[in-house]
Image (tube, rainbow, N blue to C red):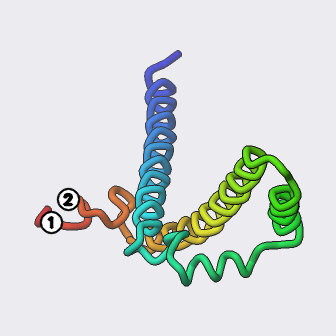
Amino acid sequence: MNAPALCSMTAEVRRHLRTVDQEERRLNAIERNAALLMLPEGGYCPFDPDNLREALGELDGEQLAVIASHVGKALNTKFSEDKDAHYQLIGLHIAGYLTAYWTKYAIRQAEGEIDDSGCPYCFGTGCPHCDPTH
């Protein structure tokens, strides 16, 4: 293989790696911002009373059927161990649903913030490319 072809291939590999690195930085920034949005002060906390009310109001028929099934089993069993297990399943199902519901919206918000940040290097966290005082 001659040197110009090798240089061309090397340049193409480097471009590809830069693209991969940039996308990885973007995804990490989205993940970081979404996690911050999920904190109580972030506005997307699953267990904030207003957020809880909104998410529970969005439960679909299938999700309600699962919860209702466990409520019925918990109320109709004679053994406290079985009741406790069903109550735990109810709680786990609701907590999982709330977390998934608000994570979806936090990720959407974080994606918008990151994509609007303007800096493909740090995505708004501050770096020499976008902030000369950094």
Residue 82 x/y as whole percent: 78, 46
- Horizontal relation, residue 25 to residue 78: left or right: left
Secondary structure category for the residue under label 2: loop
Name of the residue lying farthest toward the top: 1
- Horizontal relation, residue 80 to residue 35: left or right: right
Q: Is residue 51 above or below residue 98?
A: below
Q: Quadrant of residue 65?
A: bottom right
Check contact, mark 2 vs mark 1: CB within 8 A. Answer: yes
Q: Is residue 85 above or below residue 4?
A: below
Residue 23 x/y as whole percent: 49, 50
Q: Is residue 30 above or below residue 60?
A: above
> What type is the residue that disc 2 sits on?
Pro
| Numbered disc total | 2
> What type is the residue that disc 1 sits on?
Pro
Quadrant housing the C terminus: bottom left
- Residue beneath the point at 59% across and 71% down: 105
Residue 128 x/y as whole percent: 20, 59
- Residue beneath the point at 38% across and 70% down: 118
Residue 132, labelled with which disc?
A: 1
Residue indicated by mark 2? 128
Name of the residue lying farthest toward the front: 78
> Which of these two is toward me, 96 or 15?
96
> Which of these two is toward me, 46 or 103?
46
Secondary structure category for the residue under label 1: loop
Q: Quadrant of residue 59?
A: bottom right
Q: Quadrant of residue 54?
A: bottom right
Packing grade of label 2 (10 A; few <14, some 14-19, many >=20) is few
- Horizontal relation, residue 121 to residue 83: left or right: left
Q: Is residue 57 above or below residue 29?
A: below
- Residue beneath the point at 87% across and 62% down: 72
